[in-house]
Amino acid sequence: SRDEVANDPSLGEIFDISTGKDVPTRKIVANRESVWAIVALEAKDQLRQRIAWALAQLLVVVPDQVNSSGGTHSEVFLHYYDTFVHHAFGNYGDILREVTFSPQMGENLSYLYSKSGAYNFENTGKFTFADENYAREIMQLFTVGLYLLNIDGTE
Protein backbone atom coordinates (compact mmCIF):
# COMPACT_ATOMS: atom_id res chain seq x y z
CA SER A 1 0.00 0.00 0.00
CA ARG A 2 1.02 3.56 -0.56
CA ASP A 3 3.29 5.11 2.09
CA GLU A 4 3.60 1.95 4.18
CA VAL A 5 6.80 0.40 5.47
CA ALA A 6 7.74 -3.15 4.54
CA ASN A 7 6.95 -6.07 6.82
CA ASP A 8 9.70 -8.06 8.53
CA PRO A 9 10.99 -10.39 5.74
CA SER A 10 11.55 -13.20 8.24
CA LEU A 11 7.76 -13.42 8.70
CA GLY A 12 7.13 -14.12 5.02
CA GLU A 13 3.81 -12.80 3.82
CA ILE A 14 2.16 -12.95 7.22
CA PHE A 15 1.05 -9.80 8.95
CA ASP A 16 0.04 -10.35 12.54
CA ILE A 17 -2.42 -7.61 13.36
CA SER A 18 -2.69 -8.64 17.01
CA THR A 19 -0.44 -6.87 19.49
CA GLY A 20 -1.16 -9.07 22.47
CA LYS A 21 -2.63 -5.98 24.09
CA ASP A 22 -5.88 -5.94 22.17
CA VAL A 23 -8.77 -4.07 23.69
CA PRO A 24 -12.51 -4.69 23.39
CA THR A 25 -14.15 -3.79 20.08
CA ARG A 26 -16.04 -0.81 21.43
CA LYS A 27 -12.79 0.85 22.55
CA ILE A 28 -11.17 0.31 19.15
CA VAL A 29 -14.18 1.77 17.38
CA ALA A 30 -14.08 4.75 19.73
CA ASN A 31 -10.33 5.15 19.15
CA ARG A 32 -10.79 5.03 15.38
CA GLU A 33 -13.48 7.66 15.55
CA SER A 34 -11.38 9.82 17.86
CA VAL A 35 -8.31 9.67 15.63
CA TRP A 36 -10.39 10.42 12.55
CA ALA A 37 -12.09 13.36 14.30
CA ILE A 38 -8.76 14.86 15.42
CA VAL A 39 -7.26 14.57 11.94
CA ALA A 40 -10.40 15.83 10.21
CA LEU A 41 -10.86 18.79 12.54
CA GLU A 42 -7.27 19.87 13.06
CA ALA A 43 -5.54 19.08 9.76
CA LYS A 44 -4.22 22.00 7.75
CA ASP A 45 -5.91 20.65 4.60
CA GLN A 46 -9.52 21.09 5.71
CA LEU A 47 -10.98 21.13 2.21
CA ARG A 48 -9.27 17.82 1.38
CA GLN A 49 -10.55 16.26 4.62
CA ARG A 50 -14.11 17.40 3.99
CA ILE A 51 -14.12 16.16 0.40
CA ALA A 52 -12.68 12.82 1.56
CA TRP A 53 -15.45 12.52 4.13
CA ALA A 54 -18.10 13.31 1.50
CA LEU A 55 -16.66 10.70 -0.87
CA ALA A 56 -16.61 8.14 1.96
CA GLN A 57 -20.34 8.77 2.44
CA LEU A 58 -20.97 7.98 -1.24
CA LEU A 59 -18.72 4.95 -1.73
CA VAL A 60 -19.57 3.16 1.49
CA VAL A 61 -18.50 -0.22 2.83
CA VAL A 62 -20.48 -1.85 5.62
CA PRO A 63 -18.27 -3.01 8.52
CA ASP A 64 -20.39 -6.13 9.10
CA GLN A 65 -19.90 -7.19 5.46
CA VAL A 66 -16.09 -7.01 5.59
CA ASN A 67 -14.75 -10.19 7.18
CA SER A 68 -11.09 -9.20 7.16
CA SER A 69 -11.68 -6.68 9.90
CA GLY A 70 -12.86 -9.38 12.30
CA GLY A 71 -14.97 -6.69 13.90
CA THR A 72 -12.04 -5.50 16.01
CA HIS A 73 -9.42 -4.03 13.71
CA SER A 74 -9.79 -0.74 11.94
CA GLU A 75 -6.71 -0.85 9.68
CA VAL A 76 -8.68 -1.99 6.63
CA PHE A 77 -11.14 0.86 6.99
CA LEU A 78 -8.41 3.44 7.58
CA HIS A 79 -6.70 2.31 4.39
CA TYR A 80 -9.99 2.51 2.50
CA TYR A 81 -10.62 6.02 3.81
CA ASP A 82 -7.09 7.08 2.86
CA THR A 83 -8.08 6.37 -0.74
CA PHE A 84 -10.47 9.31 -0.58
CA VAL A 85 -7.97 11.56 1.16
CA HIS A 86 -5.41 10.81 -1.54
CA HIS A 87 -7.83 11.34 -4.45
CA ALA A 88 -9.90 14.19 -2.96
CA PHE A 89 -8.95 16.64 -5.72
CA GLY A 90 -8.47 14.04 -8.42
CA ASN A 91 -10.48 12.34 -11.10
CA TYR A 92 -13.63 10.43 -10.07
CA GLY A 93 -12.63 7.63 -12.44
CA ASP A 94 -9.37 7.18 -10.51
CA ILE A 95 -11.34 6.97 -7.27
CA LEU A 96 -13.69 4.36 -8.74
CA ARG A 97 -10.72 2.36 -10.04
CA GLU A 98 -9.00 2.28 -6.64
CA VAL A 99 -12.26 1.50 -4.83
CA THR A 100 -12.97 -1.28 -7.33
CA PHE A 101 -9.62 -2.92 -6.63
CA SER A 102 -9.88 -2.53 -2.85
CA PRO A 103 -10.44 -5.75 -0.88
CA GLN A 104 -13.00 -3.98 1.29
CA MET A 105 -15.33 -3.30 -1.62
CA GLY A 106 -14.71 -6.82 -2.94
CA GLU A 107 -15.99 -8.31 0.28
CA ASN A 108 -18.71 -5.73 0.75
CA LEU A 109 -20.31 -6.26 -2.66
CA SER A 110 -19.68 -10.00 -3.02
CA TYR A 111 -17.39 -9.97 -6.06
CA LEU A 112 -14.32 -11.14 -4.18
CA TYR A 113 -14.67 -14.79 -5.26
CA SER A 114 -16.79 -14.20 -8.35
CA LYS A 115 -15.66 -15.91 -11.55
CA SER A 116 -16.51 -15.03 -15.13
CA GLY A 117 -18.87 -17.16 -17.17
CA ALA A 118 -16.01 -18.11 -19.52
CA TYR A 119 -13.83 -19.25 -16.60
CA ASN A 120 -16.64 -21.38 -15.19
CA PHE A 121 -17.37 -22.92 -18.60
CA GLU A 122 -13.70 -23.78 -19.24
CA ASN A 123 -13.23 -25.37 -15.82
CA THR A 124 -16.59 -27.01 -15.12
CA GLY A 125 -18.22 -27.29 -18.54
CA LYS A 126 -21.28 -25.46 -17.21
CA PHE A 127 -22.48 -22.12 -18.45
CA THR A 128 -23.10 -19.74 -15.55
CA PHE A 129 -23.46 -16.01 -15.15
CA ALA A 130 -20.87 -13.99 -13.28
CA ASP A 131 -21.86 -11.98 -10.21
CA GLU A 132 -22.84 -8.59 -11.64
CA ASN A 133 -23.79 -7.00 -8.35
CA TYR A 134 -20.80 -4.65 -8.28
CA ALA A 135 -21.34 -3.47 -11.86
CA ARG A 136 -24.96 -2.69 -10.99
CA GLU A 137 -23.91 -0.86 -7.83
CA ILE A 138 -21.38 1.24 -9.75
CA MET A 139 -24.01 2.21 -12.31
CA GLN A 140 -26.94 2.81 -9.98
CA LEU A 141 -25.40 4.10 -6.77
CA PHE A 142 -21.98 5.51 -7.51
CA THR A 143 -22.34 7.10 -10.96
CA VAL A 144 -25.28 7.65 -13.32
CA GLY A 145 -28.19 6.38 -11.23
CA LEU A 146 -31.40 4.80 -12.47
CA TYR A 147 -32.78 7.76 -14.42
CA LEU A 148 -31.37 10.36 -16.76
CA LEU A 149 -32.10 13.62 -14.97
CA ASN A 150 -32.60 17.08 -16.36
CA ILE A 151 -30.13 19.80 -15.47
CA ASP A 152 -32.45 20.96 -12.65
CA GLY A 153 -32.54 17.44 -11.12
CA THR A 154 -36.02 16.49 -12.27
CA GLU A 155 -36.76 13.31 -14.25
Image (cartoon, helix red, strand yellow):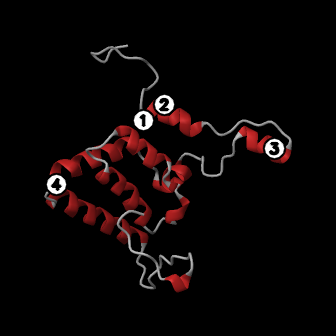
The earlier-in-sequence mark between 4 and 1 is 4
Residue depicted at x 32% and y 65%? 32
Residue 74 appears in the picture as rendered: no
Q: In this view, does 152 lie above or below 33?
A: above
Residue type of the residue flagged with mark 3? Glu
Asked if residue 81 lies left or right of residue 11, the reply is left
Q: To which residue does mark 3 refer?
A: 122
Q: In the rendering, at what x and y percent does residue 35 appear?
A: 26, 66
Query: What's the mark number on residue 142?
Result: 1
Estimate the spatial distance between the alpha carbons at disc 2 and disc 3, rounded to whole Å: 29 Å
Residue 142 appears in the picture as rendered: yes
Query: Which mark's residue is nearer the viewer, 2 or 3?
Result: 3
Q: Are marks 2 and 4 in contact (CB under 8 Å)?
A: no
Few, some or many C-alpha atoms within 10 Å of disc 2 (few <14, some 14-19, many ≥20)? few
**In-front residue for pair 7/133:** 7
Estimate the spatial distance between the alpha carbons at disc 4 and disc 3, rounded to whole Å: 51 Å
Q: What element carries label 4?
A: loop
Q: What element carries label 3?
A: helix
Query: What's the mark number on residue 77?
Result: none
Q: In the rendering, at what x and y percent does residue 39 appear?
A: 21, 62
The answer to which quarter of the image holds residue 24 is bottom left
Few, some or many C-alpha atoms within 10 Å of disc 1 (few <14, some 14-19, many ≥20)? some
Residue type of the residue flagged with mark 1? Phe
Q: What element carries label 2?
A: helix
Q: Do the residues labelled 1 and 2 touch (CB within 8 Å)?
A: yes
Q: To which residue does mark 2 refer?
A: 139
Residue type of the residue flagged with mark 2? Met
The earlier-in-sequence mark between 2 and 3 is 3
Estimate the spatial distance between the alpha carbons at disc 1 and disc 2, rounded to whole Å: 6 Å
Q: To which residue does mark 4 refer?
A: 45
Q: Do the residues labelled 2 and 3 touch (CB within 8 Å)?
A: no
